[in-house]
Amino acid sequence: MEREIIELFRRYLKLQGDLPLGDDAGAIMLGDEWLVATNDMLVRKTDVPDIMTPEQVGFKAVTMNVSDVAAMGARPVGFLFSLGVPRNIEMDYLEGVAEGIEKALEFYGVPVLSADTNEADDLIIDGIALGRTKRLLTRSGARPGDLVCITGDIGRSLAGLLVWRRALDVPKKIREPLYEKLLEPRARVPEGIELSELANAAIDVSDGPSKELHLLAHMSGVRIGIEAQKLPIREEVRAVAEALGLDPIEMALASGEEFELIFTIPENLLDECPVRCTVIGRVLKGVGVYITIDGKRQEMPVLGWEHLNREVKGTYREMFR
Amino acid sequence: MEREIIELFRRYLKLQGDLPLGDDAGAIMLGDEWLVATNDMLVRKTDVPDIMTPEQVGFKAVTMNVSDVAAMGARPVGFLFSLGVPRNIEMDYLEGVAEGIEKALEFYGVPVLSADTNEADDLIIDGIALGRTKRLLTRSGARPGDLVCITGDIGRSLAGLLVWRRALDVPKKIREPLYEKLLEPRARVPEGIELSELANAAIDVSDGPSKELHLLAHMSGVRIGIEAQKLPIREEVRAVAEALGLDPIEMALASGEEFELIFTIPENLLDECPVRCTVIGRVLKGVGVYITIDGKRQEMPVLGWEHLNREVKGTYREMFR
């Protein structure tokens, strides 16, 4: 239904900013700089696993928005939020959320500009982040010849979610790094700022690398080729995939809310790029995304919540309940 | 509880913008201009009377945010929104909301920068508006000697609500102007922009003129004197007050979501002020707000939802149900 609703609103909303809807954030020119603005609503019932502490919830509400700003190559300059609060909420819980938001604001160095409280049936945090940049990174700037890179590693968020949902008995040294990414992801803010001067395109991993790569290819009008063996997948993810009889590559490509940045960069600029990252493929002429596994090239399926829905009972979102 | 929650968050959120929390909107300096940002969440169950069409709901979600930008003396430059959508929503209703949002964006000349959809238990529209201005109007700028002025008229929104709630049998020519203000209020955007060069302080009427005047006096550290007979109260409001045995002045002062601007301006600038308005009082040294009725001066009570709660069964918000 989400897609249907988005299409409906796209059809009606003709008056858009200097960058059309469809990127990580909206943007308008103010003087000689871009002002970037994005919003993302967190609903406790559907977006928050039970094991998440209220501090982690508050922190994440900031992270998910700041990450979209980072993906535009912008420096976050302000955060706003609206709270929907059920009548029966425990004040301790809210206090934890407030602490988490403040910790995140300090972590990212972003001031809060405005806050609003309302009564609602479920706890809702609608976060808004603003940022500024001289040069905008979009989803549509990838050019044939660019290298495709990603920060950090992928798959831990989904692996952690599955460990929790299935009550998988894994050693602490495996569980901890997975839960860290699931419960305390961090946005790649300094990386986004650095990349704004060098990269051609960027997107943050919120729905899973596979979906983001498809979006990047589609919006840039290019073909993307990925080398499976280059994907930064940690041992802990491979261990969980094995325990569940899942393919670690599929799991990593379907893993959402990683908040890593996928970006494309001209090959000759890679040496001067100060961002720690892994080169995972290349931008080509054409359409779609392919992946090379053990020397065999195949079209990359769009892996994500719907995919997981087939592999694992219940949708990705339902898993949070 | 709202107050308690706001206090809680104020205590935690230390990292604020260039203007502390507590005004109509937050603000930061970008270059030589202020960027103003505000957000306000509309929850169908508590904020939307049944008679409101979905188009009116969508329009109002924009108006309430744009009004806060106008109250800062800023020109709106962008709108963002997050939707919370229940599973069982009728697509027709959503389509109406989309139409209303688009109509409002065209009316105010504001582009949409970003939109987000989520599943929620109740229909929620969290709107965000951005604006820019060289000179910021705040709630804390009123100075002794200033005149206190208001745009338009006050009381129709609450009078309309009571007509509807009580199923009052009033002639169409009374009901229509009341419902117009209740269901289709408009933000004073051109007025806010004009005032930014002349006024010392401004606030928009969202919780009722009485509450806004008290806020203005408190945040500016001044005393405000109001002349009851100067308040712009239309005949239709007086008729409804009489029919219900209520005081029309109290009703007008308690009426929320009028989206008129209350502002203070040095007396010598009034002649060059192009904004159509009514002078309703004066800023003095001291604290609090008084009102002169039939030559008798008395402290103005804080009239609003809580006040109405005593006069009329049910809280203001509960009246919407």
Image: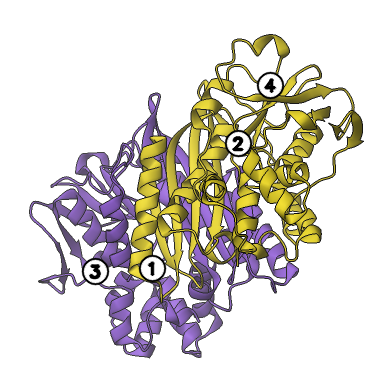
Chain colours: A yellow, B purple
**Nearest to the observer: residue A14 or residue B194:** A14
Check residue B31 in the rendering and tell me which mark sits there, or answer none.
Answer: none
Which mark is in front, 4 or 2? 2
Going from the N terminus, do you reach mark 4 or mark 2 first? Answer: 4
Q: Quadrant of residue B253?
A: bottom left
* Quadrant in the picture for the N terminus of chain A: bottom right
Q: Which residue is mark 3?
A: B229
- Residue drawn at (35%, 47%) of the image: A102
As measured in the structure, the alpha-carbon distance from the residue carrying label 4 to the one carrying label 2 is 16 Å
Q: Which residue is mark 1?
A: B256
Q: Which residue is mark 2?
A: A260
Does residue A32 appear to the left or right of B153 in the view shown?
Answer: right
Give the answer, above or below, for where A9 lies relative to A112.
below
Asked if badges 4 and 2 are on one and the same chain, I answer yes
Residue count near mark 2 (Cα–Cα under 10 Å), binned few <14, some 14–19, many ≥20? many
What secondary structure is marked by label 1?
loop
Identify which amino acid the numbered label 4 is placed on. Answer: Asn
Check residue A200 in the rendering and tell me which mark sits there, or answer none.
Answer: 4
| Chain ID of residue with mark 1 | B
What secondary structure is marked by label 2?
loop
Which mark is in front, 1 or 3? 1
- Residue drawn at (41%, 76%) of the image: A88
